[in-house]
Image: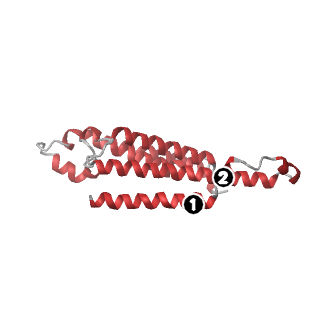
Amino acid sequence: EYWYNYTLLIYFAMAVVVVGVPMLVLMVLTVNKKHLFDNTSEHHEPTVMMFGPLFVQYEEKYWYFEVFVILEKMVLTGGMCLVADGSTVQTVVALLVSFVYMMFVLRTAPFLHDNDDVLSFVTSLQLVLTFLGALILQMIQAIATAKKAIPDSETEAMDTTNSMEQFHPKTIGYFLIVINVLCLILMVFSLMA
C-alpha cells in the first residue's frame, strides 16, 4: 500500500530514462557530428576516445544508429514494464518493437562490416522468433485454462482439432533453444572472420 503512492512517480522516472537516455546520446553525437569522421579535425581523436563506442562501428551516414539500438533496448527492458505485465499485450508490443527494429536493420545495413549487418539482422530475427514463441506459449496456456473452466458437457462439443494444439510447449522450447544456440554459433564465426 505504501509503495502504491509512488507509482506515478516511478512511471514518470521510467519514461524519462527510456526516452531521455537515447535523446542525450543523440544530442552528444549531434553536437560532435563534425568531428566524428573527420580525421583532419583537431577534435577528432578526443571525440573518438570519448564517444567512439557510440558511432565507430557504423557507416558514416548512419552515425546516429546507436540511438536506435539504445532506444530498442530501453523500450524492451524499461518500457515493457509500463505495458500490462505478463500479458499477451506485452508480448505483442515487444514482438512489434523487435520486428520494426529488425526491418530497420535489414533496410539500412548500418554497420561498417557486412558480417556485423548479418549478425545484427540474425540476432534481431532470433529476438522476434523468441517473442513469437512466447506468444504461442501464452496462447496455449490460455486455451488450457479456458478448457478447464468449461463444463465437461460443453468441452465434448468443442472442436478438438484446435490449431493451437498442434504446438506442443516442449517443441517450442526446443525451437527457442536451437535458434538461440545458432545465434551464438554465428557470433563465434563472425568474430573469427
Amino acid type assigned to the residue bearing label 2 in the image: Gln
* First along the sequence among labels 2 and 1: 2
Along the viewing direction, whichever of 192 and 83 lies nearer the viewer? 192
Question: What residue is pinned by disc 1?
Answer: 173
Q: Which residue is drawn at 31% across and 41% down?
A: 64
Mark 1: secondary structure: helix
Residue type, numbered disc 1 = Gly
Residue 117 visible in rendering: yes
Kindly indicate the quadrant of the structure image that contains residue 20. top left
Q: In which quarter of the image is the N terminus?
A: bottom right
In the picture, measured across the screen, residue 19 lies left or right of residue 31, that is right
Q: How many marks?
A: 2
For the residue pair 6 and 169, the one nearer the viewer reads as 169
Answer with left or right where residue 46 lies relative to residue 15.
Answer: left
Residue 65 falls in image quadrant: top left
Q: Residue furthest right?
A: 153
Q: Is residue 9 visible?
A: no
The span from disc 2 to disc 1 (Cα, nearest Å) is 14 Å
Which residue is depicted at the point 57% across and 52% down? Answer: 133
Give the colouring mode of the picture: secondary structure
Q: Mark 2 against mark 1, which lies toward the viewer?
A: 2
Secondary structure, mark 2, is helix
Tell me the residue that label 2 is attached to.
Answer: 166
Checking the image for residue 133, the label placed there is none
Q: Where does the image place residue 99, in percent across and percent down from the top left?
A: 48, 43
Picture coordinates of residue 111, whole percent (x, y): 29, 46
